[in-house]
């Protein structure tokens, strides 16, 4: 069961020679092919991946692997620049764009021997909470095809095809979450601006880590909101996330917003005694629309800690209810600024309109961006107008400070970690999700996740249990700035307690047998 | 990522211009769409620039003969760091614009002056002094023709006692001479316009050096809202001085204003004072010496090698040497006559072995660069001053005799 192993397990297997990097790579590539219907990947870099795998194999043969990541197949969200491999941000604006450089985090992965399988699908320019609004189509949640979902979901009618019953991955890093969840890679990079790593992690039943702002370099991550974006880590278990974090974190001279302090990678201790721990339950996160199921799970989780001897207290983050509006103002303002560079002149799509530079810009941008992106640009520019700047932008920054201070106060009062739901409910069926527009959905879905982005705090989604419909539900832990070790240690303990079930996908079983087979079957029982 | 050298240059310049250096300054984005601005915004310092409230002293000649100099001051509003854009070249014949992005993103220092100058001559003198300061500091080579120093002039007119009039911005000025011309033209144009009952538009105009006038620049429609926003990728710039410098800070990561102050070279004004004091030359001489690259050093070198008093040497430098250089469009460095040769010549003059008329002739001869020494030329052409009384009497007698015969 190599494909379903954790990153650390498979790394040990590589080291011991129980599997070779090329074999591993080939299996992943084959699985990607047969799970194509998930639409998790925009680009599969088959040739380069196999080459990287071969080089890794050479190193293992010489007994000189670069480290724990050597030979490990990984995937990267398509808003990270990858040299020589198309980077599209799921937008017409960048279709066909080949970047001349690697994002710092991509370079770090490659320098440690990781095998880059491909670029994963997302909402266009990472704007969205469903991974449904990219030009390459929506990503399907692998759990839609799981035994657990099929057994528990009530089809609307018997004649209804499975096709229309599939559920979303959440977003915007849906492709990365689906890739990890369906075992096509052992870790994936996402990005998290308002919850875009944690949200799909929760819906796809994987671990999604949002690191502290300033810990991991954003150089090469095509920016959405410079003051909130962070590269996100998606893995199968918390220990794997710690491994990725260790290889990515640290000061980057090319990103002036990374902190200067030395970062020391760590191994997570196996926490047994939680009596020293103080867990905070933010009462405002009992948001309108929170499903009773998740509320119950949240409660159960709190009890879990209590019964194990930890101190569990209700806390208040009073400015939570202003965070959505505040986030929208600041997010759209920065988006409007960051999208100004897409004018069709230097790279990317360029319209055929030639009458004047202005008309070329206007046409290029109308053709290149979907309406979600255009909507945010227009709003953002509105907020940045001279007459509106004080009323909206500056005000929102002040509110942002208040929101961040809420957390500071709570952490100062002795609370170590906050425990909250990640999403309002389990994954919605696609047909239901698209009934509302992107803005509405984002406003609803971001509510539990974006305060952590505004405050720059680390947060992690841990898959907790299956819902009644057989779909994953996750809970998130929010920690103090730069205290990832403590955060992940607690998350690991919790993970061990809940024993979240493994997804049962027929496709994967076929690919993961010890005899390597090429099976192309369209049916999944 | 912020360029350290740019910050250092800005601090040096700010100190040289007697500004207060802001220990904390901020970066902003200024948004507008243009072909030479690839990001759609320029990073600049709109809210809190790196240096403010300085002054620049410069000198003018009252008449054109450089015999009376008066000192003026222009206040420096601020110095800000910002990004350069690319370069647009308009090809009207093919209706296209070519964009060169090589310099886009490179750091610039913008020095903003207050409207304390009243004519082209003052503007030119102030900018010339600024140019010398920048060159002395090493902040920039400040050659206008190469775009290393770019000057935009803001001009307005008003009746004495009334508030300042509407200003126009004049761009495309490529030399100090053109700056004076452009400013004076614009002043005249505005006066004429107003006297004819017209109004001045707050517009941007381009200087046409061929025609010697300013013309409105096309494609400027209305006032732009630049939608300023703090630059999220650049944290506030913190500068330290000896007092505020934290003890265990890695000195590679910080800039110490006091440290920079201690290492400032002598500014032109200081250099001039020293020249005047040391060599007893006139202030206008010191200006002329510093106005030509390398001339002051040449002068000092000659002084060292000759017995002639500096007060006399200066004439030879500023009148003779300089006019030869200008005639042949040479820089001091390219002079075919070295300081050694000139000093040698001046020694001959000082010892009264030749007359000053002869000295000028010899200099012209030396200029040919044929490798002869002054003494060789004098001997060859028999230009020596006769000192022998008897010989002189003989010659005079011969001349008189010759006259009588006619």
Image (cartoon, rainbow, N blue to C red):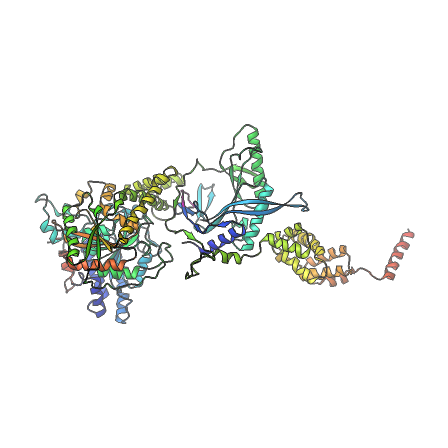
Main SS of the magenta part reads: loop
Instruction: Judge whether residue B155 can be spotted in this image.
Output: yes
Q: Where is residue B280, by image quadrant?
A: bottom right
Residue at the right extreme of this rendering: B405
Residue at the front extreme of this rendering: A413
Q: Which residues are magenta?
A: B29-36
In the visual, does A72 lie left or right of A343? left
On screen, residue B216 above or below A104? above
In front of the other: A34 or B44: B44
Q: Is residue B33 magenta?
A: yes
Residue B372, given in percent of the width and then of the height, sits at 70, 63
Residue at the top extreme of this rendering: B197
In front of the other: A514 or B51: B51
In front of the other: A64 or B79: B79
Residue at the bottom extreme of this rendering: A62
Residue B127, given in percent of the width and then of the height, sits at 56, 46
In the visual, does A521 lie left or right of A94? left
Q: Where is residue A369, by image quadrant?
A: top left
User: What residue do we see at 76% from left, 54% from top?
Assistant: B357
User: What residue do we see at 28% from left, 61% from top?
Assistant: A246
Residue A63, given in percent of the width and then of the height, sits at 27, 71
In front of the other: A520 or A395: A395
Looking at the figure, which quarter contains the N terminus of chain B? bottom left
Instruction: Judge whether residue A39 can be spotted in this image.
Output: no
Residue A75, given in percent of the width and then of the height, sits at 25, 57
In the visual, does A260 lie left or right of A430? right
In the visual, does A257 lie left or right of A144? right
Q: Is residue A323 magenta?
A: no
Could you tell me how many numbered marks the image carries?
0
């Amino acid at each position: 069961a190599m494909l379903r192993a954790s990153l650390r397990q498979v790394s040990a297997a590589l080291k011991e020679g129980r599997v070779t990097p090329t074999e591993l790579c080939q299996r992943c590539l084959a699985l990607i092919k047969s799970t194509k219907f998930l639409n998790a990947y925009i680009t599969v870099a088959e040739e380069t991946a196999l080459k990287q795998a071969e080089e890794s194999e050479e190193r293992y043969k010489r007994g000189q692997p670069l480290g724990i990541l050597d030979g490990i197949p990984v995937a990267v969200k398509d808003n990270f620049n990858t040299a020589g491999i198309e980077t599209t941000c799921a937008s017409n604006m960048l279709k066909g764009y080949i970047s001349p450089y690697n994002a710092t985090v991509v370079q770090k992965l490659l320098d440690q021997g990781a095998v880059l399988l491909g670029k994963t699908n997302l909402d266009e320019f990472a704007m969205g909470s469903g991974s449904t609004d990219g030009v390459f189509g929506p990503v399907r949640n692998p759990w839609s095809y799981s035994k657990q979902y099929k057994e528990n979901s009530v089809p609307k009618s018997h004649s209804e095809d499975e096709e229309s019953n599939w559920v979303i991955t959440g977003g915007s890093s849906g492709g990365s979450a689906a890739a990890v969840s369906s075992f096509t890679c052992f870790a994936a990079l996402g990005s998290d601006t308002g919850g875009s790593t944690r949200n799909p992690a929760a819906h796809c039943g994987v671990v999604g880590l949002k690191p502290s702002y300033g810990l991991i370099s954003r150089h090469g991550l095509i920016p959405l909101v410079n003051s909130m974006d962070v590269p996100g880590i998606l893995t199968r278990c918390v220990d794997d996330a710690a491994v990725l974090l260790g290889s990515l974190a640290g000061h980057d001279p090319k990103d002036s917003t990374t902190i200067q302090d030395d970062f020391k990678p760590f191994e997570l201790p196996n926490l047994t005694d939680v009596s020293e721990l103080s867990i905070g339950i933010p009462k405002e996160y009992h948001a309108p629309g929170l499903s009773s199921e998740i509320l119950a799970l949240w409660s159960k989780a709190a009890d879990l800690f209590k019964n194990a001897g930890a101190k569990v207290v209700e806390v208040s983050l009073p400015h939570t209810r202003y965070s959505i509006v505040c986030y929208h103002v600041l997010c759209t303002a920065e988006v409007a600024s960051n999208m100004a560079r897409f004018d069709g002149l230097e790279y990317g799509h360029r319209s055929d309109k030639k009458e004047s530079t202005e008309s070329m810009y206007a046409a290029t941008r109308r053709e290149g961006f979907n309406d979600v992106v255009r909507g945010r640009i227009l709003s953002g520019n509105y907020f940045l107008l001279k007459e509106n700047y004080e009323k909206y932008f500056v005000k929102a920054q002040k509110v942002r400070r208040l929101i961040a201070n809420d957390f500071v106060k709570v952490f100062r009062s002795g609370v170590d970690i906050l425990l909250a739901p990640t999403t309002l409910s389990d994954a919605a069926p696609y047909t239901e999700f698209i009934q509302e527009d992107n803005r509405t959905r984002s406003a609803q879905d971001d509510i539990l996740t974006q305060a952590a982005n505004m405050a720059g705090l680390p947060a992690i989604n841990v898959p907790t249990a299956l819902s009644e419909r057989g779909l994953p539900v996750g809970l998130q832990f929010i920690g103090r700035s730069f205290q990832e070790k403590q955060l992940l240690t607690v998350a690991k303990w919790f993970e061990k307690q809940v024993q979240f079930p493994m997804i049962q996908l027929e496709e994967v079983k076929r690919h993961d047998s010890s005899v390597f087979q090429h099976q192309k079957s369209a049916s999944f029982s | 990522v912020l360029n350290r050298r740019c910050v250092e240059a800005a601090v040096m310049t700010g100190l040289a211009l007697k500004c207060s250096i802001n220990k904390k300054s901020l970066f902003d984005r200024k948004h507008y769409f243009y072909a030479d601005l690839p990001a759609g915004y320029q990073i600049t310092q709109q809210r809190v620039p790196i240096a403010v409230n300085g002054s620049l002293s410069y000198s003018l000649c009252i008449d054109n003969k450089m015999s009376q100099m008066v000192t003026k001051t222009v206040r420096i509003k601020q110095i800000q760091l910002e990004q350069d854009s690319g370069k647009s070249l308009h090809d009207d014949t093919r209706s296209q614009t070519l964009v060169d992005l090589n310099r886009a993103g490179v750091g610039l220092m913008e020095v903003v002056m207050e409207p304390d100058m009243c004519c082209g001559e003052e503007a030119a003198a102030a900018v010339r002094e600024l140019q010398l300061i920048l060159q002395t500091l090493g902040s920039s080579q400040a050659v206008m023709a190469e775009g290393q120093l770019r000057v935009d002039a803001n001009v307005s007119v008003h009746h004495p006692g009334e508030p300042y009039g509407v200003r126009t911005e004049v761009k495309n000025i490529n030399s100090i001479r053109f700056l004076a011309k452009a400013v004076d033209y614009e002043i005249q144009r505005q006066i004429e316009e107003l006297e004819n009952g017209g109004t001045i538009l707050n517009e941007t105009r381009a200087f046409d050096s061929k025609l010697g006038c300013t013309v409105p620049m096309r494609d400027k429609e209305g006032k732009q809202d630049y939608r300023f926003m703090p630059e999220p990728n650049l944290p506030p710039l913190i500068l330290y001085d000896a007092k505020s410098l934290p003890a265990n800070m890695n000195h590679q990561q910080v800039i110490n204003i006091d440290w920079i102050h201690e290492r400032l070279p002598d500014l032109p004004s200081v250099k001039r004072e020293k020249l005047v004091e040391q060599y007893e030359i006139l202030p206008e001489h010191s200006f002329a010496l510093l106005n030509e690259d390398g001339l002051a050093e040449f002068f000092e070198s000659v002084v060292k090698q000759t017995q002639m008093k500096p007060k006399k040497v200066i004439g030879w430098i500023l009148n003779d040497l300089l006019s030869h250089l200008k005639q042949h469009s040479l820089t001091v460095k390219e002079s075919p006559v070295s300081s050694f040769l000139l000093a040698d010549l001046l020694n001959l003059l000082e010892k009264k072995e030749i007359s000053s008329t002869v000295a000028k002739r010899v200099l012209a001869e030396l200029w040919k660069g044929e490798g002869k020494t002054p003494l060789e030329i004098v001997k060859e052409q028999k230009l020596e001053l006769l000192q022998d009384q008897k010989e002189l009497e003989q010659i005079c007698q011969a001349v008189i005799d010759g006259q009588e015969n006619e």
